[in-house]
Image (cartoon, rainbow, N blue to C red):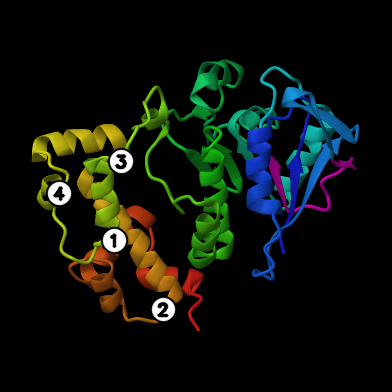
Amino acid sequence: MTRVAILIYPDTALFELGCAVELFALPRPEYPDWYETDVVCFGEQAVRATGNIMLQAKPVASLTDYDMLVIPGWPLHMQPAPDLIDEIQALHGRGGTVVSFCSGAFLLAASGLLDGQSATTHWRYADVFRDQYPDIHYVDDVLYLFHNRLGCAAGSSAALDLGMAIIRQQHGYRVANQVARRLVMAAHRSGGQSQFVEAPVARTSNHFADTLDWAISNLTTGLTIDALAKRANMSRRNFDRKFRASMNISANEWLVLQKLELAKQLLESTQLPIERVASRAGFENAITLRHHFRKHLQSSPSRFRTQFGRAQ
């Protein structure tokens, strides 16, 4: 069982805190090895959050009892105490995971663990982050980064994407999909921050969005991009332009990623032969499936099943 500490601090951002609590602290008795989580603070037990709300947390002086730390934000110009930095470094040094949401990347960067590595935070803070931490490679257009047991989520809702990626890695695709359904969200979103910046929300459903939903439900029917464009009542040229502007990838790339997601679910939850998995996921054959596994996941279907398979 993974023991998780969610750190609160003066002026805690409530949305990001709520995301962390929903992901890792909400009781899920259906999963016997689920996370064991405390909301903690260094110093005072009561902490003032956004809106002058007072929060009570478990006061700690050490993170020794925890395997993962979640930082749901951090004031951009607040200097962390040396003992907090020491505890973050020690947790990661003994094999623990450290995850930041939104501006929490500033505390993670201050710990020195990101030096020479890639990181991200909300696009509004990008310039400040680059100025404060020039030794870190800032990545503009991603929802999150997770590598070497260090994670950064770009913004508020991207915290959920990063959290789902961690749940998927630690508990598998079946559990991640079930948790995502409870959150009423996709288990995995493709794309980057740019699709959410200054982008108006559609007032009603539209043919383009409906076409993507339909495609996900019909991956095994030999879909073509021309057929998708026709269903969206768009020319192929306009459809391709709209797709890249909306999703930041081509329609072909998106379609392959959806098929891979379905293949991963089948590999985890069934003992179907690889050829059958390929067919049911919409690939032409097992050779094509293996090609895309190598290209996008640097793995193979068989290796993935060995790692994540939970079929009885």
Label 2–label 1 contact, CB within 8 A: no
**Of the residues tagged 4 and 2, which is closer to the observer?**
4
Dot 3 alpha-carbon crowd within 10 angstroms: few under 14, some 14 to 19, many 20 or more: few
**Of the residues tagged 3 and 2, which is closer to the observer?**
3
Task: Specify whether residue 303 is in view.
Answer: no
Relative height, residue 63 to residue 26 (above, below): above
Q: Which residue is mark 4?
A: 231
- The quarter of the picture where the N terminus appears is bottom right
Query: Disc 3 residue type?
Result: Ser
Q: SS of the residue at dot 1?
A: helix
Q: Which residue is mark 1?
A: 217
Query: Disc 2 residue type?
Result: Thr
**Of the residues tagged 3 and 1, which is closer to the observer?**
3
**Of the residues tagged 2 and 1, which is closer to the observer?**
1
Whichever of labels 4 and 1 marks the residue nearer the N terminus, that label is 1
Q: Position of residue 47 (x, y in %)?
A: 84, 30
Residue shown at the point (29%, 35%) measured from the top left = 246
Whichever of labels 3 and 2 marks the residue nearer the N terminus, that label is 3
Q: Which residue is mark 3?
A: 205
Instruction: State the separation of the CA atoms marked 4 and 1.
Output: 14 Å
Instruction: State the separation of the CA atoms marked 3 and 1.
Output: 17 Å
Residue range corresponding to the magenta coloring: 57-71
Q: SS of the residue at dot 4?
A: helix
Relative height, residue 122 to residue 236 (above, below): above
Whichever of labels 3 and 4 marks the residue nearer the N terminus, that label is 3
Specify the farthest residue to the bottom.
312
Q: Position of residue 86 (x, y in %)?
A: 80, 36
Residue 68 included in the magenta stretch of the image = yes
Instruction: State the separation of the CA atoms marked 3 and 4.
Output: 14 Å
Whichever of labels 4 and 2 marks the residue nearer the N terminus, that label is 4
Q: Which residue is mark 2?
A: 270
